[in-house]
Amino acid sequence: MFRIITKTSRLFPLKGIPSAVSASLKASSAKYPIQSIPFSCIVPQQSYFRSFSSSYTSLNSQAMEQPSTSDQIVLFSEYEPIPFSSYSSVNPNTLKAIKSEFKFDCATKVQNAIISQIPSDQDFLIKAKTGTGKTIGFLISAIETLLKNKKSGSYDKDSVGILIVSPTRELAKQIANEASKLSTFHKFGVHELVGGESIRNQTRSLSNRPKDIVVGTPGRLLDLWDSFPEFGRAASKTQILVFDEADMLLDLGFQKEINDIVSRCPRDRQNFLVSATFSSKVRQTARKALEGKSFKELDCVDPNESSVVKKIKQSYILANWDAHYHLISKVVASHIAEIKEKTGAGAKILIFLPTTKSVQVYSSVLSSMLSKSGTPLNKPDKSSRFRNHRAQYKNSVKIFSIHGKKSQDVRTRTSDNFRKFDISNNNTGILITTDVSARGVDYPGTSLVLQVGVPKDPQQYTHRVGRTGRAGTYGEGITILSEFELPFIRSLSLEQGVELKESEVFNSSMVSDLVEAIELTKKEADTESGETKDSTTDQSLEAKNELIPFVKKHSFGFERYKNEASVEEIEDMFISCIGYYQSLEGILRYKVNDLISQVSRSMLPFGIDKIPHLPLQLRLSLGIGRPSGNSKSFSRNNYSRNNSSTRYKDDSRFNDHRHGSENHSSSQPRFNGYRHGSENHSSSQPRFNRYGSKNNRESSDNYFQKNRSSGNRDRRNGNSYSR
Ligand SMILES: Nc1ncnc2c1ncn2[C@@H]1O[C@H](COP(=O)(O)OP(=O)(O)OP(=O)(O)O)[C@@H](O)[C@H]1O
């Protein structure tokens, strides 16, 4: 195994430069005189740094703790104070593009590790922390091989030079964009072959321009391989094959497609496998998938560290689902205030949710809530003199959302708009998304990643949280958990080395104050619309619970959405989330009762106090059915797992999930009954929503079935029916 680590036996602080940085400088001073190192190499480059100048001293501090051993080269941070211009092995046209198009002066640690291997036609497995510049790293190296092959005549113009496979469309587009910029002076043809876009445009482009660099998602690449012979022939002669986010590609979801692509490429190609996370299982699969070839491993992550950069402050908040909307508003508001104080600018925030349905509901709710919070959210400031000018959007919050059910056109536009979103006028952009945005996607300036519910596995946590703290900038990661999700923290520690602690600010006492404030506000609203005004909601309470004004301010927006939302929407969200958590049973080891009890709380704020009918397939996966015995009336606690499949032969339903008020513990829903028994909710009988109207939704089973069958190869970009 190959490992690059920098030597740090003694540190000699240089005057005026933070000690960690000076140590870093010292380490490379033998090779590169200090005078020749631009200051921009010492601190993170580009605009990311502008807003966070106060934080740069901590940039390299983590390296100080590294032990030194004589046979290792120790690196101090994710940044190497080595100017790109000093790499004689990199083609001048590439260096020119790095300078003029990217405006980078110095390599990051992983880039230095990769460039140090040039020239090489070996296969590489590259592992480095999130947001540390792996993309440009592998592109520089692959371009060198391509140029070498061109020179030696082993590359004919009808071949594909570099074929880059990405698990998601957004990432493929981003890589294609970086590849185009990097090849500005090489005049390479760069193609982007992703699903959801016009095949005709893609084939036209392939016919008209050289196929030096092709970036695509597995499904579309294979479709074109089969349906467009010109591309099929060229791709079969691929010189360099790259799997970005290789662990995700090699994970079950894309196994077949990857094997297919590998088997169609020539054996004597160069391979790159790139990711921030690689499990041993994925390493094995990689070897198998790539015909037993051996890889040179460039592992830039210290085995004692996680793949999350240390600068990202991470914590969790324990809260029930019915508190989510106000809690998220509060977290967002606090973060905006903190960033404003630190930088004078607005913030960029990413919120991850488990499923498409939850993204749809949460983005509508939060849009409505935040837009009523006193700031002209998503709306121009009418008092502005510059009504049609950008300045009118000062202090606003704009909500974006992306999920797999949106058309590719909309996804691309949203992604571009969020990337370019200008925070300099104190505006804040919030992207609410499923895992389609979890891997590789770069939204510079994102300062908070908020995960609502745990991700599908500990690796995914690393990738999600890695959307912040990129290129050396400040970042914070907060995960909102409910009690049944707590076991995830242990898995995260064991598998990713991330020790997640409860948030100091949003601790249990703050969350219970918030819950109390929500209840009091609701009570007050009820009494105002009803008979007598309740004396319990007077000003003395506001003095005791300072969150009441905050909750009141945001509740109006919530109520506004609630009045528009359909019961179907909310119930579908619940069902989709249960489907999501079903697949996490191995990690969370929850009791089905606890899962359903907790997730059903997501419907409470909307006044829905009955558990909707769960699709048969989902119930089978959860292992629940009619308890033994002839009783037709079950308590909620009878959601026991069945070991015997025969129990389902009569298609037993959840007959009655009655949950009497006497049973209410704090972890249980407040409402009285999940009365959802055969008397009301058999599939053949009408169901009634909270408005008392008939619920005409198609049966849940059909609903799930339909959505499942609509999946295709490319939709598996982390966004099948539920994501
Ligand atoms: N040498 C450099 N100097 C400054 N910024 C850089 C440098 N190289 C890359 N960057 C910037 O760092 C950010 C992260 O880069 P990139 O997306 O390649 O990270 P990554 O390691 O692939 O992350 P992930 O694991 O999330 O995919 C990008 O905004 C990129 O432009």
Image (cartoon, rainbow, N blue to C red):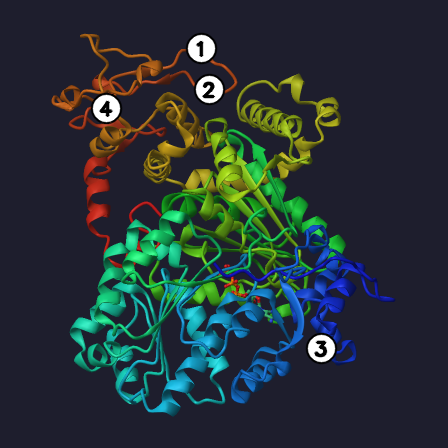
- Cβ atoms at labels 4 and 3 below 8 Å apart: no
Disc 3 element: loop
**Disc 3 residue type (three-letter):** Tyr
Asked which secondary structure carries label 2, the reply is loop
- Does mark 3 have its CB less than 8 Å from ligand 1? no
Q: Which residue is mark 1?
A: 663
Residue 405 in view, yes or no? no
Please report whichever mark, 2 or 3, sits nearer to the chain's N-terminal start.
3
Task: Inspect the image, locate mark 4, and give the three-letter code of the amino acid beneath it.
Answer: His
Image coords of residue 555 (percent x, y): 57, 37
User: Where 202 sits versus 669, above or below?
Assistant: below
Residue 305, x across and y down, in percent: 59, 48
Regarding residue 488, the answer to whether it shows in the image is yes
Q: Which mark is residue 705?
A: none
| Label 3 – label 1 distance at C-alpha | 71 Å
Is residue 280 or residue 586 the one in the foreground?
280
Quick one: label 3 or label 1, which is nearer the N terminus? 3
Instruction: Please say if the residues under marks 2 and 3 sit with CB atoms less than 8 Å apart.
Output: no
Mark 4 → mark 1, Cα distance in angstroms: 23 Å
Disc on the earlier residue, 4 or 3: 3
Residue depth check, mark 3 versus mark 1: number of the one nearer the observer: 3
Residue at the disc numbered 4: 681
- Front in this rendered view, residue 391 or 403: 403
Q: Are marks 2 and 1 in contact (CB under 8 Å)?
A: yes
**Is 562 drawn above or below residue 92 in the view shown?**
above
Sequence-wise, the earlier of marks 4 and 1 is 1
